[in-house]
Amino acid sequence: MNSASLFLSLVQAALPAEAAVRSAADERFKLWGAYSLADPWFLLLIPVGLLALAWGRGGRGRERGRVPALVPGKPSRSLAQNLAWLPTALSAAAIVLVSIALARPLRGSVETSSQTEGVDIALLIDQSGSMRFEDLEEGLSRIEVVKSVVHDFAVRRMTDREGAADNVALIVFAAYPRLLCPFTLDVDAITGFLKELKPVENRAEDGTAIGVGLAKAVAVLRESNSKTKVVVLLTDGENNIDLITPLAAADLAVQEKVKVYTVFAGRYEFGYDMFGNLQRSKREIDTSDLEKIAEKTGGRFYRARDRKELERIYAEIEKLERTKRVGDLRPLSRVARARPPAARPRLGPRLDFSPEAAVTSLFGFDLLRPGMLAAAAAGPIVLAIGVLGLSARARARARLIAPEQERRFLPRFSENRARVRVALAAASALFLGFALVGPVRGYTLRDVRRRGLDLVLCVDTSRSMLAQDLKPDRLTRARREILGLLDKLKGDRAAVLAFAGDVRDVAPLSHDRVTLKAFVSTLNPEDNLRGGTDLGGALERALALFDGRTGAHEAIVVLTDGEDLEGHGLEVAKKASERGIHVYLVGMGTLEGGKIPDGTRGFVKDEDGKEVVTKMDGKDLQAIADATGGAYLAAESSPIPLEELYDKRISRLEGRELFAGKERIPHDRFQWPLVLAAACLLGEVGLRERRPGRGAA
């Protein structure tokens, strides 16, 4: 019976990392290194338990009878007699292990990942030209008011909902829809894209394609594994592009089980007059399409005439779509070994958690390891073994001592005390089994803070980056370098800029490496508005992305072929140096150079008809690196130049603490059954089998 208690204690201590959980306990007693104890006073049970064991197992603890020697000489000892010390040793080990478990040993500084199930929400926002008018709040355009309200909604959904992390995507539309940010758990990414949202300015791109926009949102949600999929569609006008009608898009949403909430924001309808100017329309606003979309998909239609109504609407949507959680799953235990962090959600689809992550409930407690519930069967097993042992011992006594002589030879022996010891041992094993399944109840909300750097990755997408002197070409190699760097980032945030003759924001500062990788993979010279290489403009835009407090935790990384055609890169680099921001550069090219493809299986030619050869010139890049205290490395000199720069230089910069939301950490209640197990164990080892009083020993 004591062996079973020890076995369960050892199993609890040796659980694999996958079965362990993070503790909400605070460190109260430092041990060594990263190890500490949350409840060190439970260690007092060790001397108490060992004293109880000595009392119960001592020379006077068991009843012994006296019989005359029948055989002269010293009798031989059986195997059972030679191993008589083993139960006592196992009992002592069980006391020590249970006491240590109750003291809750912790290990800090473990990289963790929370696993929760939430709602996938696609925010679909109209950015047509009429969104620049001011009728929701005086002095602010419709788009500014909408951005502010949606920003607060997204922040609440992604960080403040009891530690839950809803997956949110951002889609905008006018005449055409555009996915600004795929599904992400990183609130910085969503708010960063919202910040840059503006009404379209080109008349050719203007319009209100509600049906096309909704179809795009449904397509983004199609591969989601979330049980609840929601689109919040906000517009300020009627559908005027019937490539896909609003009702046809609603049918698509019904097929994909997507619920759509529709919001009309604005007091008046606007439209273009005969001269191409946006003017207030006198006709009545028709919201029938929005109402039918909401009705078909099981959502609701709302009308907002000012900011307060818009805030109330989004607050109501937030209450209707409550976050659904798998349960109180936590990151890895601070006691156990750390496993690699869980994969971030894929682009579009929701993170699909494995079946073994499911949490069941028992007596009002959630169980973190329901598969270990079978360990509670050790209680009945120990009871059965104990009953059989008592019966065997009774038969052995009967063979040696006649029943009428038992009180003469064993005057203080108590069969009832022996039965109580068996019951206590069985109860101890049962409670140890319940502790093993990891019962939790209640939770603590804690801020999640990461320590890291802010990096802006500037990628040259000029046509010269298509040269193939680096295989397969300079731009593809640059993309691979960035993807490799993103895999190394842990607490760091990164933003992505693309530049040629112009500079484009690709992704704001974000922790979401999956989203960043998706945008990096789409970098293409065809997106450039102007040809050339404006290195200074890229550095200026990168500086604008930082908060400006201190450059100690900020760095700019540039991947370019070195041709600063605008010629003011060094001037901007000096501004970065004044702010303490380092610039690290990777030269994407070779000294021999390469020809530039023209897209027609030929190569770009100069005015004289000769094929242009673009060669790597690292002088300007080295000057920028020297001016900022950064570093320059040519791609041809290293197989992984960007990762080399990160390992040797960038990662050694001073990081800062960044708020990364909240996490819900349930309270471990394994101590409750473990305390009962410890009490039963102490009772079992300390209870003597003979009655108190005087008599034959």
Image (cartoon, rainbow, N blue to C red):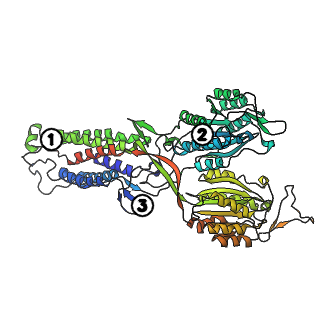
Pick whichever of labels 2 and 3 is earlier in the sequence.
Answer: 3
- Residue type marked 2: Asp
- Residue type marked 3: Ala
List the residue tagged with mark 1: 414
**Crowd rating for badge 1 (residues with CA inside 10 Å; few <14, some 14–19, many 20+):** some
Q: Position of residue 412 (x, y in %)?
A: 11, 43
List the residue tagged with mark 3: 34
Is residue 537 at least partly visible in the picture? Answer: yes
Pick whichever of labels 1 and 3 is earlier in the sequence.
Answer: 3
Position of 425 with respect to 636 (left or right) is left
Q: CA distance from mark 2 to mark 3?
A: 37 Å
Q: Is residue 293 above or below residue 452?
A: above
List the residue tagged with mark 2: 120
- Residue type marked 1: Ser
Q: Position of residue 82 (x, y in %)?
A: 23, 55
Q: Which residue of the protein is positioned furthest toward the front in this rendering?
A: 138
Q: Position of residue 591 (x, y in %)?
A: 77, 71
Position of 252 with respect to 202 (left or right) is left
Position of 249 with respect to 609 (left or right) is left
x 68%, y 68%: residue: 573
Q: Position of residue 635 (x, y in %)?
A: 70, 67
